[in-house]
Amino acid sequence: MARLRNLVILTGAGVSAESGIATFRGPGGLWEGHRVEDVCTPEALARDPALVHRFYDLRRAALDTVEPNAAHHALARLDAAWPGDLLIVTQNVDDLHERAGASRLLHMHGELRSALCAACGIREGWAEALPPETECPNCGMLALRPDIVFFGEMPYQMERIEAALAAADLFVSIGTSGAVYPAAGFVQTARHYGAATLEMNLEPSGGSHWFEESRMGPAGALVPAWVEELLAGA
């Protein structure tokens, strides 16, 4: 561990699941009772904006009913204490990492508590319901939509993520399925640049064979133990 300085940590739905937030795909391939194609594509937004906006309104409101868990708090502790570079890249659109205290954080798939103007591109903090044709406070167009990266759209800040992976000494994936790209390919990028790799998950992911080490179990138990281990050797 003495050689570790730069860390990149990818978190997925398995981290927030222990706080009571539904994982990305539930039974039967549904996302909280909906087909992903009905609520998370540009075509869905164009076809039925009321459904898409209502779906994310409900998810945004549900954030008030959940709290960060031990994994979120452990990563926030690591963020505050780690002397080298650290970047938490989350696929989650909730705000539990922030509420736990993490600051070196990037939401690659957008955020529930944010609105995006489809006309001018501004991103605006948003805590209330977001009906279709809400006026943008920047340009005045009736073009605000959920600030969520839909299927077929480019995740946020990919250049920054790629640069962090290229400089990383250790890449850690926590609570991810290993099935959604480009995040599923981060382990290969990290290995290409020489980083050590660690996976923590309830069960082996679709990309487990790419990791040098895998630890299986709930994030709320594995992550605090790993952070303790890491900081003790820093």
Image (cartoon, grey):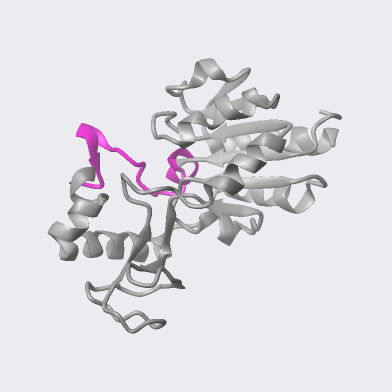
Residue 144, by quadrant, is: bottom left
Q: Residue at x 18, y 63 (%)?
A: 49
Q: Residue at x 58, y 23 (%)?
A: 215
Q: Is residue 135 visible?
A: yes
**Residue 31 part of the magenta-drawn span:** yes
**Looking at the image, residue 75 lies above or below residue 190:** below
* Residue 220 percent across, percent down from the top left: 56, 39
Q: Residue at x 43, y 56 (%)?
A: 110
Residue 213, by quadrant, is: top right
Q: What is the count of numbered marks?
A: 0
Please name whichever residue, 40 or 69, is drawn nearer the observer in this view of the structure.
40
**Looking at the image, residue 37 lies above or below residue 100:** above
Q: Position of 111 compared to 213: left or right?
A: left
Quadrant of the drawing holding the N terminus: top right
* Residue 4 percent across, percent down from the top left: 80, 32
Q: Is residue 70 visible?
A: no
* Residue 62 percent across, percent down from the top left: 35, 61
Please name whichever residue, 32 or 46, is drawn nearer the observer in this view of the structure.
46
Q: Position of 130 compared to 124: left or right?
A: left
**Looking at the image, residue 211 lies above or below residue 230:** above
Q: Position of 182 compared to 43: left or right?
A: right
* Residue 201 percent across, percent down from the top left: 51, 29
**Residue 57 part of the magenta-drawn span:** no
Quadrant of the drawing holding the C terminus: top right
Q: Which residues are magenta?
A: 13-35
Q: Residue furthest left?
A: 47
Please name whichever residue, 223 or 111, is drawn nearer the observer in this view of the structure.
111
